[in-house]
Amino acid sequence: AVKNNSKKPLQTVEVIIRKKILGEAPEEHHFIVADGKNLRNIIELADALETMSEEIFRHHANEFKNDFSAWVKDVFYDHSLAEDISRAKNRLETQITILRRLVKELM
C-alpha cells in the first residue's frame, strides 16, 4: 500500500511535466533541421545537438538569429529557456543549457 501511495503523486508530476516542457509540438510546428532531421520536442533537440555538425548549428544559431531559441519560445512558450538558449555561445553550451533545464523539471 505504501508503494502505491508514493507512485500516484509521481505520475501526476510526470503528466504535468510532459505537457509543459516534455510535450510534443504539433506536426506543423516540428523543427526541421538544415540536415533534414525532424525534431518533435525539446528532448529531441538536446539529442540532435549531440551529433549536429558545427556548420548546421551555425546555420540555425548565429549573430543574426537563433532558430532553436525561437522554436522553444514560440512553440513551447518557455521564455526563460529560450532566453538561456539565446545566450549560449556554442552547440555544447546550448545542449548543456537544455539538459540542465530538463533535469530541473524532473526534480
Image (cartoon, grey):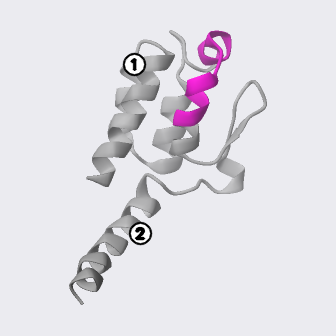
| Residue at x 54% of width, y 19% of height | 65
Q: Is residue 98 magenta?
A: no
Mark toward the viewer: 2 or 1: 2
Q: Earlier in the sequence, mark 2 or mark 1?
A: 2
Q: Give the percent coordinates (x, y) of residue 75.
A: 53, 47
Horizontal relation, residue 31 to residue 61: left or right: right
Among the 4 quarters of the image, the one containing residue 8? bottom left
Residue 19: give x, y in percent of width and height. Answer: 45, 63
Circle 1 crowding by C-alpha within 10 Å: few under 14, some 14–19, many from 20: some
Number of the label disc, if any, that sits on residue 64:
none
Which residue of the protein is positioned furthest toward the right in this rendering?
A: 36
Q: Which residues are magenta?
A: 46-59
Secondary structure under tag 1 reads loop
Q: Identity of the amino acid at label 1? A: Ala
Q: Which residue is mark 1?
A: 88
Q: Where on the picture, by quarter, is residue 17?
A: bottom left
- Residue drawn at point x = 48 percent, y = 49 percent: 76
Q: Position of residue 89 (x, y in %)?
A: 41, 12
Q: Amino acid at mark 2?
A: Val
Total label count? 2
Q: Kindly identify which residue carries mark 2.
A: 15
- Residue depicted at 55% across the width and 18% down the height: 61
User: Any magenta on residue 48?
Assistant: yes
Instruction: Measure how far apart labels 2 and 1 are at the Cα level.
Output: 29 Å
